[in-house]
Image (cartoon, rainbow, N blue to C red):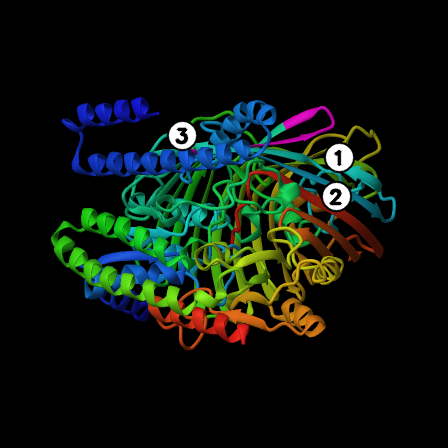
Amino acid sequence: MRTLLSSLLLMLAALPAWANLNIFATVPEWGALAREIGGDKVRVYTATTAFQDPHRIEAKPSLLAQARQAQLVVAAGADLEIGWLPLVQRDAGNPMIQSGRPGYFEAAAYVNRLEVPTVLDRAHGDVHAAGNPHTHLDPRNVLKVGEALTARMSELEAANAAVYQANFKTFSGKWQAAIKRWEQEAAPLRGVAVLVHHASFVYLANWLGLKEVGTLEPKPGIEPTSGHLSELLARQQTMPAKMVLRAAYQQDGPSQWIAGKTGMPAIMLPYTVGGSAEAKDLTGLFDDTVQRLLKGLR
Amino acid sequence: MQKKFAMAALLAASCGAQAADADLAAIRSQIDEMKKSYEQRIAALEQKLAQAEAKSAPAAVAAAPSSLAAGAVASPSSAGAANGFNPEVSLILQGQYKNMKNIPERSIGGFVPAGTEGLNNRGFSTDETELVLAANIDPYWRGQAIVAMIDGSAEIEEAWAQSLAIGNGIGLKLGRFRSGIGYLNEQHPHARDFADAPLMYQAMFGDSYTQDGVQLKWLAPTPLFLELGAEFGRGANYPGTDRNKNGTGGAALFAHVGGDVGISNDWRAGISWLKTAAQERESGFMDINGLAAKGAFSGDSTTWLADFVWKWAPNGNPKYQNFKFQSEYFVRQEKGNLNCSSEDAASTCASVQESNYRTRQSGWYAQGVYQFAPEWRAGLRYEQLDSGSRDFGANAANLQVDGYRPKKTSAMVDYSWSEFSRVRLQVAQDKSMPGLTDNQLTVQYIMSLGAHGAHKF
């Protein structure tokens, strides 16, 4: 009993000081952005990794424990985390992170979302009412979200506002230069037809001018079936794709199958920070994504 | 649209004078979100308009109003629901086909029947259709009601309000709710991994324990998940009975700990205590000559539960492959007295006999479920109960006291087309009744439509 008590006390002592803003990011990309803005003035906990489907996560005990102490939840939004985040928000006993409060931030609210369905019907699969939630793969969106997140973090932790704004200014400068560079490098990708495993790359395609001609999933959230893959294969005659893309967390079987049948390269994209050895941070994520796509073209 | 926005800003400005800083910030962020949402709607409408213009002129005239409506519906603010202020609605459809022996008064050997419904339903049947309504009530409360409907009756399965704004890790629930004791107790039948509740839950509560009352939970501010809970309520459900009295009729305490082991493993363990009181709780017995008799128990029940869950998924990504192990143990003590009575003049209980009553009974189950492909899962469950000690005092001379160790083994395979539909095949060898082996086959479907369900751990 005494050891239990003393270990509990130790754990309490190990908690970070309240001077730093405690951020709970649902996905690695927004966790990384919060780190760019916050620097050493924030503690960022990232709930998922690049190898986890952010849609399929459960309200695990560890997530509840982390959300309990968070001052700011940074979510992708647009229903990406609908299966688990509302449960975590409600059961964490933390009023700061409830929807509608400053401690709840949704990235998707600050960008123009694509694929907003005109009809909400699950006959079309697990569609998101607010549009495609994978907004971060357009670096211009990262900038928009960054601006809003800086404002939000400054509001929550006024004492560090100047630091956040300065950090974001530096990041934004670097980022704008990087966008120019990526756009130049990726110029050959304009108009290239691609197949994708899941509609995870809509914003990337929109930015680089890739032409998405089909998804391996017959409907969003439903695993590829052999019938649907054969259909895609048949369509290759009329609408030939140059490569097939999947995210690090998606299984490679279906894209390898298509690649094997057609000879097109199957490209694994890191999708988010941590998805490949090169994608250590946001810049690395886009560097690597562009390089991998260009490699597919050769 | 601009007018609306201006009004909102005015409103915000006038309220701002009295509002606290936090409120101001909240309003600002709401306005910000509104602005974004309107910009998005305008963009969507412009896009629609462009598309409509591209078509022939008459078509464009017809298309414009409908696409206007569609555009407005299509871009709900990401913070709210598509239905505006309407609650999230979902409906659970369940049904089954069952093959098993015909045993009209199915019960678990050595245990008092806890009132499990539909135990002898054979052939095709529709299970309860569950209607779930949930929404935030205001910034401080969230509410949820679950109505279970079957054959001319609608039962309020749950109806509670949950606090959102207390803070310090405190959660308060008021109303009718599934008690937080054990692991399986809070799960609705449609979320379970097998077609029926474990024998342990059937013997303890009939199926699961629901309380009318208050639940208070506290989540510790530690990286390790530690949750403590207390419940006070009416305690009207088995093993308690409804009693007309002031004060508390039943109470429960529970503690849960949990966490991650590496990136691929998660666990939770818990211990719970439930105290209920019964007054004239009637159940069927056999008298010493094998004639039907009734026993009415008055006294206290104390139930202890221990639960453990372990989940594994490669890289913590449960989509393609995952494994879940869960096990629970219970022990229950009942103390009080028992009245035996019978309508049969030949029975030893023909005149009411009262005696002491003391029992101590236990049981456990363990199960593993493996998802080996995105759509497929297979599972195995073994369970065993022990009728333990049953001291009927003087009534031991009037009633049959049977000791037994019920056992059951179940295996299941299920297939899910999507997150929202599942069909399951289950076979079981049920030795829960003395001298009987019942081989059971169940085919079951579970469908959920409407609002996206929650992925509870």
Residue B455 horizontal side relative to residue A108, left or right: right
Amino acid identity at mark 1: Cys
Residue A7 horizontal side relative to residue A126, left or right: left
Q: Which mark is residue B399?
A: 2
Looking at the image, can residue B147 be seen?
Answer: yes
Magenta range is: B142-154
Chain letter for the residue marked with disc 1 in the picture:
B
Judging by the rendered image, the residue that carries numbered circle 1 is B349
Q: Report the quarter where the C terminus of chain A lies.
A: bottom right
> Which image quadrant is residue B91 in?
top right
In terms of secondary structure, what is the magenta stretch mainly? strand
Sequence-first disc among 1 and 3? 3
| Residue B128 sits above or below residue B208 on the image | above
For marks 3 and 2, give the CA distance.
53 Å
| Residue B91 sits above or below residue B228 on the image | above
Q: Hey, which residue is sitting farthest right in the picture?
A: B102
Tell me the mark number nearer the camera, choosing from 1 and 3: 3
Sequence-first disc among 3 and 2? 3
Residue B159 located within the stretch drawn in magenta: no
Q: What residue lies at 63% left-to-right and 72% top-to-bottom? A: A264
Amino acid identity at mark 2: Leu
> Which image quadrant is residue B171 in?
top left
Amino acid identity at mark 3: Ile
Chain letter for the residue marked with disc 3 in the picture:
B
Q: Pointers 1 and 3 in contact (CB under 8 A)? A: no
Asked whether B295 or B419 is in front, the reply is B419
